[in-house]
Amino acid sequence: AIAILHDVDDYWNAPGGAIVRYNPKTGDLRKLGIPVPHVYIQGMVIDEARRVAYCQTFTPEYLAAFNIDTGESRILGLTGSGLAMGQSENIVLDKKSRVWGFWGVTRAWQQHGIGPDMNRLYCYDPAADKMTFFKHGLPLMEGRYGFAGPDGMFAASNGMIYCGSGEGGLCRVNPDTAEVKLLGAPCPPRRIAAMTERDGFLYGIGGRFGNASLFRMDLATEKYELLGRLYDPELDVSAWQCHDMSFASDGVLFAGENDTTTRPGYLWEIRL
């Protein structure tokens, strides 16, 4: 899915984010369609059984469903107020194929921002074709009032959804009850956006401004440990921050760096 942050004066000129399919064996690259005209796509998750790509867009913020076989699409709901960004970096599917993400409330009467409780959970159930907008989000650190800004989301094999917050908290969401629990802060602040899983462990990268660090958590006990800061001694370069990560079949971990300010973002190869 293609993302871009164009200004609103280019809204009618912008075609909108496309779903693009690439076959690495044949080199075939084709555009399947644009789910929401003029609006770009910031996150996507695919329900293989239903052949549907769910897209969260910006700006405005919608949740849309795109049929990858027919190219048909529809908007399932508005998820942002327009006063601030409500969404996290990605959306996920639980084991019942429900879509989970975050929405932002509207507080037009507040003069100084929307308030500390604007980012809240939503769930779309395709079986019922229903959006549920919950009144709660991720807890803030130290028991402060409000909800933390959401960052990364990951649907683990144990059925739980793990979320990283903008201030560096790691939370667990039970998709059957929507209950959220703050598990702690497993790495230097801020932003836990990148997460993946291997051999019963959740791996994540948090920290920013050159302090990106890798942690892992035992999914059975939810005890975590800090593995270290991402640093290349040959280049004398530290990872700025990372938004995505994935294991290769041989166990090598790859992490995509983003938002670097003085150089291009790197693809980091991590051998545990």
Image: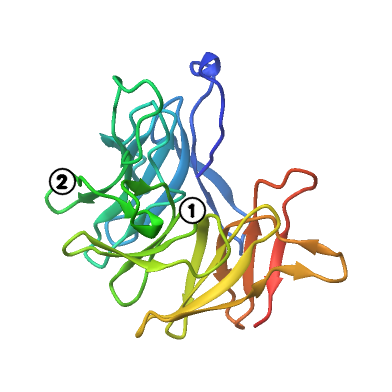
- Percent across and percent down for residue 215 are 55, 74
- Percent across and percent down for residue 57 are 42, 37
Judged from the image, the secondary structure of the residue bearing numbered disc 2 is: loop
Judged from the image, the secondary structure of the residue bearing numbered disc 1 is: loop
| Nearer to me, 27 or 261 | 261
Q: Residues within 10 Å of mark 1 (few under 14, many from 20)?
A: many
Type of the residue with mark 1: Glu
Quarter of the image where the C terminus is located: bottom right
| Nearer to me, 147 or 62 | 147
Which residue: 58% across, 48% down?
29
The numbered dot on residue 129 is: 2
Q: Quadrant of residue 184?
A: bottom left
Type of the residue with mark 2: Asp
Cα distance, mark 1 to mark 2? 33 Å
For label 1, the residue is 167
Which residue: 79% across, 44% down?
262
| Chosen colour scheme | rainbow
Which residue: 37% across, 40% down?
71
- 14 to the left or right of 102: right
Q: Earlier in the sequence, mark 1 or mark 2?
A: 2
